[in-house]
Image (cartoon, rainbow, N blue to C red):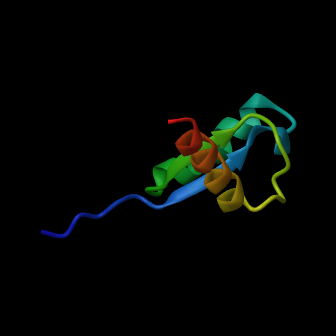
Amino acid sequence: MIALRKPTYYLWRDDFSSQEEFEAERKKYANIGFRVVTFLDGNSNTNIHDGIKALIKNHWDSV
């Protein structure tokens, strides 16, 4: 069995000047099949994978 997953698209809320502009962009990607992950703050130029790895490492160390 082949399991297909939706590709992920990351959006930063701070990159948009209004909620309406943000929602339009989010819906655009969701409607073409992406799973949209939204970050409320932070620098959109930062490598997201480094942040995710650090989050997992910090969580794993606390277990």
Query: In this image, 57 relative to 46: left or right?
Result: left
Query: In the rendered image, is residue 27 in sight?
Result: no
Task: Where is residue 38? Give x, y as percent.
Answer: 64, 41
Q: Residue at x 70, y 52 (%)?
A: 51
**Of the pair 9 and 47, the residue shown nearer to us:** 47
Query: In the rendered image, is residue 13 in sight?
Result: yes
Task: Where is residue 12? Give x, y as percent.
Answer: 75, 44
Single out the residue that lies furthest toward the bottom: 2
Query: In this image, 2 relative to 51: left or right?
Result: left
* Figure disc tally: 0
- Viewport quadrant of the N terminus: bottom left
Task: Where is residue 44? Give x, y as percent.
Answer: 81, 53
Task: Where is residue 56? Give x, y as percent.
Answer: 57, 48
Query: In this image, 27 relative to 14: left or right?
Result: left
Q: Residue at x 55, y 47 (%)?
A: 36
**Of the pair 31 and 48, the residue shown nearer to us:** 48
Single out the residue that lies furthest toward the left: 1
Q: Residue at x 60, y 50 (%)?
A: 57
Q: Is residue 19 above or below residue 25?
A: above
**Of the pair 59 and 51, the residue shown nearer to us:** 59
Q: Is residue 17 above or below residue 45?
A: above
Q: Is residue 6 above or below residue 18?
A: below
